[in-house]
Amino acid sequence: MSNSNLSSRDAAVVWHPFTQHQIEPISIPIASGKGAYLVDTDGKKYIDAISSWWVNIHGHGHPYLAQKVYEQALLLEQVIFAGFTHEPAIRLSERLLSHLPPNFERVFFSDNGSTAVEVAIKMALQFFHNQGNTKRRKILAFADAYHGDTFGAMSLGAPSSFNAPFQDMLFEVEFLPSPQDTQACLAAMSSLNADDYAAFIFEPLIQGAGGMKMYEASTLDALIRMAHEKDMLCIADEIMTGFGRTGKWFAMDYLAEKPDIACFSKGLTGGMMAMGLTLCSDSLFKSFLSEDRKKTLFHSHSFTANPLACAAANASLDLMEKEETWASIARVESRHRAFAATLKNHSILKNVRIQGTIIAMEIAVGEANGYLHSIRDKAYAYFIEQGILMRPLGNTIYILAPYCIEDEDLAYIYEKITAFAQELI
Ligand SMILES: Cc1ncc(COP(=O)(O)O)c(C=O)c1O
């Protein structure tokens, strides 16, 4: 079936996420994917420069991941996870914990990034509630934060056009300044009334949807130290940064101070299946143990610890444990660094920054930086036309490709970024 046929059928019945259907182009029907490429139903290829919303760390159509999910599907596709368990979930928990700092000892399953965050917040608030502490009800987050689209996760996100229609219904969260301003953050943290806060949540090292804003590990270390002195729980939202994306297994591996709770999703299953995880210490887990059932963590989803998703995550871990994956991660970073060097004095590609496999920059034209910047739609259309899937965050363009992307595909993307900028000068 052709693009135009499918696109018009889609336009008649489907409501797409983050899409203004009145003004955005019709959706492109994708028939298949292989490695860093997506292929539409007319046969046009697109380099997936954003790993399809940051999930496909090993690329599309990976035969090993597919095989493992298939094998699991023949054995057990789904089972209720309350009162029952299964080997793929146990193995995944054991393996993941072995890659994390030793204070992480328990794994709670859910099914996407936002739910992993919801669980983290519930764990933190109920941790204090279970001990009879009724004062610690507030959460601390960063300016420009993004933690998902459910109501709890929206509350933790910086007030923005994303959550404006619901702003009056979100719970109260205190926002520190941008973590790029270390002094302002430290000052704000030290002036907080410590007894009011249950938790401090952050995207370690890179604020993704907020504009790929990068900041120093030393700033976060200082803030975690202060938060711990104030007895707050620290929650690392590693939903975008986990599984090699920043050049190490996890962004928290760059930190000296360790968080108490961590959230994972996206790259967790290599992009095969939807899954979220919230990990915490044994002492936090034990604070929920009681003869009193009211101290239970009452949270579940139908597909909690779905065996197919666990099989995909275990298979993705197999790939993550291979040296060649780390060689690819290092190669992508070095390609980005070489490209960044060529942009040093560029007149409109500014603030070029790199963290592991992520490179980001601003197109400095027109109005101030921001998600609704008018250059966004033009840039998106241009790159699609050139066979590259990029989704600029306003005037911030970034590459967050599968680790298997070939050098020549990276070179092609770099060339098209500079060609696009050239047209604007
Ligand atoms: C840091 C971070 N947290 C949470 C989420 C929400 O994840 P999901 O879209 O799977 O709900 C995202 C999604 O982009 C994210 O980047």
Image (cartoon, rainbow, N blue to C red):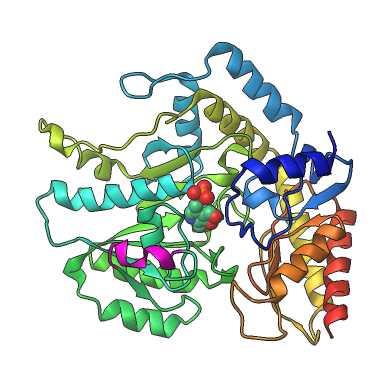
Q: Quadrant of the C terminus?
A: bottom right
Q: Quadrant of residue 271?
A: top right
Closest to the observer, 315 or 334: 315
Closest to the observer, 130 or 150: 150
Determine whether, in the image, residue 70 is placed left or right of residue 345. left
Q: Quadrant of the N terminus?
A: top right
Determine whether, in the image, residue 16 is placed left or right of residue 159. right
In the image, residue 410 above or below residue 286: below
In the image, residue 76 above or below residue 24: above
Residues in magenta, as a range: 163-172
User: Residue at 39% of width from left, 72% of height from top?
Assistant: 222
User: Residue at 38% of width from left, 21% of height from top?
Assistant: 80
Percent across and percent down for residue 322 are 69, 38
User: Residue at 10% of width from left, 33% of height from top?
Assistant: 292
Percent across and percent down for residue 178 are 46, 77
Q: Can the viewer see residue 56 in this picture?
A: no
Q: Magenta span has 170?
A: yes
In the image, residue 159 above or below residue 287: below
User: Residue at 51% of width from left, 37% of height from top?
Assistant: 275
Main SS of residues in magenta: helix
